[in-house]
Image (cartoon, helix red, strand yellow):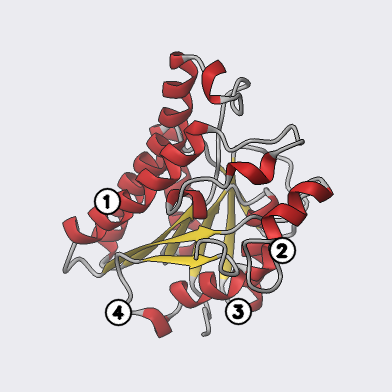
Amino acid sequence: MSLKNKVIVVTGGNGLLGKSFVNAINEAGGIPIIADINEKCEMDFSYVKLDITSKSSILNAIKHINKKYGQIDGLINNAYPRNKNYGKLFEDVDYEDFCDNLNMNLGGYFLTSQQFIKYFKKQGFGNIINISSIYGVVTPRFEIYKNTEMTTPVEYIAIKSALIHLTKYMAKYFKNSNIRFNSVSLGGILNNQPDSFLKGYSSYCLSKGMLDPNDINGVIIFLLSESSKYINGQNIIVDDGFTL
């Protein structure tokens, strides 16, 4: 599953998952581009500032990358913008905040995809992977949040479930374009969650429970490679059986 000389843009490339994806792309022989609104970059890879909610920012990033490399082979939509009120309990979420977070996140994935698709169509090929979630597939297991300060925000499940269908829509709409569209629905990622939550979460899994970021890398590299050239419009779940 070589990515030799493939130029892959990773939005949110400075984040927990983004860094893992970037390293995996590099190890597979590809050329990862860290595309992030955060200019502080600790990794020694190409960086471009990109705000997924800004058309001009996206176009400037595409122009910069194309000028430097002459091609863009793939895009991983991984960024997760949200406002300061994100994460409240359902009954405490203001309508304005609900709309704002959907606009930034789901809207940002739409806008970024739209502009990269225009580039890919002119280029003659492309590949887009959208990062979704198990909670885009099944309803939250609310009981595992008991006695913690954690919850699954209602915005999150709305965004992630819609993203799966947006991916399928784009795949069908742009058929015969030589552009592929797939989503990956991730299980929970270890990130200093309390032990009670980890125990409850693991009770739904088959083996490991919560995943490490690098547990996702295999399917990402596969979908970016020629080994998956006829996989299009699919949602691949990586969750150690949580959704069963």
Mark 2 or 1: in front is 2
Mark 4 or 2: in front is 2
Q: Is residue 186 left or right of residue 191?
A: left
Q: Is residue 186 left or right of residue 110?
A: right
**x, y (%) of residue 155?**
48, 32
In three-dimensional space, the C-alpha distance between marks 3 and 4, rounded to whole angstroms, equals 20 Å
Q: Which residue is mark 1?
A: 118
For numbered disc 1, what is the local secondary structure? Answer: helix
Neighbours of disc 4 within 10 Å: few (<14), some (14-19), many (20+): few
If you read the primary sequence from the N terminus, does the residue marked by circle 3 or circle 1 appear first?
3
For numbered disc 3, what is the local secondary structure? Answer: loop
Instruction: Check contact, mark 4 vs mark 1: CB within 8 A.
Output: no
Neighbours of disc 1 within 10 Å: few (<14), some (14-19), many (20+): few
Amino acid type indicated by mark 2: Asp
Amino acid type indicated by mark 4: Tyr
Amino acid type indicated by mark 3: Ala
Out of 152 and 175, give the one closest to the viewer.
152
Q: Is residue 34 left or right of residue 122?
A: right
In three-dimensional space, the C-alpha distance between marks 2 and 3, rounded to whole angstroms, equals 19 Å
Mark 2 or 3: in front is 2
Q: Which disc number belongs to residue 28?
A: 3
Q: Which residue is mark 2?
A: 212
Q: Which residue is mark 4?
A: 230
If you read the primary sequence from the N terminus, does the residue marked by circle 3 or circle 4 appear first?
3
If you read the primary sequence from the N terminus, does the residue marked by circle 4 or circle 1 appear first?
1
- Work out whether residue 77 can be spotted: no
**x, y (%) of residue 178?**
24, 70
